[in-house]
Image (cartoon, rainbow, N blue to C red):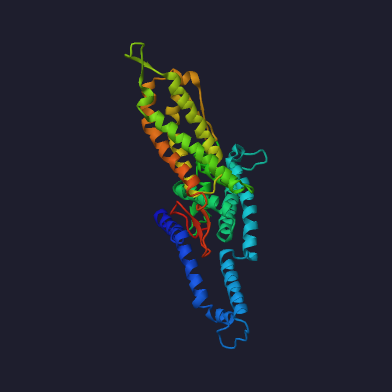
Amino acid sequence: MSNVGMNQGYSQLFQSLSSNGSKSGSTNFLSDYASIKSGSYSKLMKAYYGSGPGSSTTSTGTANRSGSGILEKILEERRNPKVSEEVQEANSNLVTGISNLKKSVSTLQNDNTYTNTENGQTAADKVVSAMKAYVSEYNDVVNASKRSTMTNKTAHVANMMKSTSANADKLSEIGVTINSNGTLQLNENKLRATDLSKVQDLFSSKDVMSYGSMVTSRLEFAGVTNTTDNKTNNTASSSAAALKADSESLASDKLYEKIKDKDGKETDKYDIDKIFATAKSFVSNYNNMFDAAESSSNSGIISNLSQIRETTAKNADALKEFGITLDKKGRLSIDENTFKNSDMSKVQKFFKNYGSSIATNASLVDYYSTTKANAASGYTSSGKYSVQGNSLFADSI
């Protein structure tokens, strides 16, 4: 199958999830309620209410209480279905699979994997072996996620799959293709014929935007077993709101107004201390937002964090000129002397675009951390998995 055909099939598979989101879930639930009262459950209800054939109820009150009780019981079972043995097995397999997949990615990120060993094993053999394990364990995680009810993990798996889809062309170059159901397939011969540096670059741990780094990030958070979502959302929201304000300030004309002398006349000097204080606050709130929000299973938050991370990575060289550096974990730091000695007109021009872009996505992180905090992942009442805020995810998981 061609890359275009594969991506279309993969996209169609993902899109069916969006059509079964929370809105349709509510509709289905109301439909269930109606059917319980007058449809497929009518005989059962009539029996309990004493109006069906063969009823032997002697007290209207008793019958009504029994009927009301069974109705609530049925509705409660629809809202909170019992977990089957199959689902329990899938949940267990998902936990194990995530742990195994993290090890596979780590092997592909290890420089030793790309060197020949003294016992005669070639780098190519080691890479093929590592990639086989990665593909197998990736597929185990995807397949387990399809049946799992652990939404705090499956949402991160969905984002991992999105990263895989975004890197479909690069993966294809090394012999890894994406099937229509979201699993991977390896062409060993094509991998052996590939320049191994392509594989190493694709899984690089030194590049925060590499495919391997993105997968590792999602797996790290999928492996977290105890999260405090409310505290995380509140911290992420406040940091994102503060980052938005700093970004807008650094992009504004007001911050760069020239200092006036004692007579009120404008000089040619900037208030560098004020500009630096704002830049320092920007760096602090940027890092705080990622520290708080990066573990979120909310697809809206993750999508906008990815946009911010990508925007910053693309502008890393320009930021470095002003003393703002990006480490391999995606966090920023600022050198005061370098920043204060920079041309503030260039700083202003840079933040006109970069700052405005960061402000937009930070505002959305704030939005999803509050308004959409509880609607970003989970199962609808109809049993369909819903990831709000991203139309790419569907019945793949």
**Residue 93 horizontal/vertical position (percent):** 64, 57
Residue 288 picture quarter: top right
Q: Nearer the viewer, residue 321 or 236?
A: 236
36 left or right of 344? Answer: right
Please, which residue is most extreme toward the right here?
119
Residue 133, image x, y percentages: 60, 51
Report the quarter where the N terminus lies.
Answer: bottom left
Is 143 located above or below residue 246 in the figure? below
**Location of residue 349 (image quadrant):** top left
**Res 265 quadrant in image:** top left
The residue furthest top is: 262
Residue 43, percent from left and from top: 55, 82
Total tally of numbered discs in the picture: 0
Q: Can residue 21 be seen from the camera position used here?
A: no
Residue depicted at 48% across the width and 53% down the height: 177
Q: Residue furthest bottom?
A: 54
Q: Nearer the viewer, residue 99 or 360?
A: 360
| As drawn, 79 above or below 337 | below
Query: Residue 77 or 282: which is nearer the viewer?
Result: 77
Q: Residue at x 36, y 29 (%)?
A: 252
Q: Is residue 261 left or right of residue 173?
A: left
Point 50% across, 52% down: residue = 376
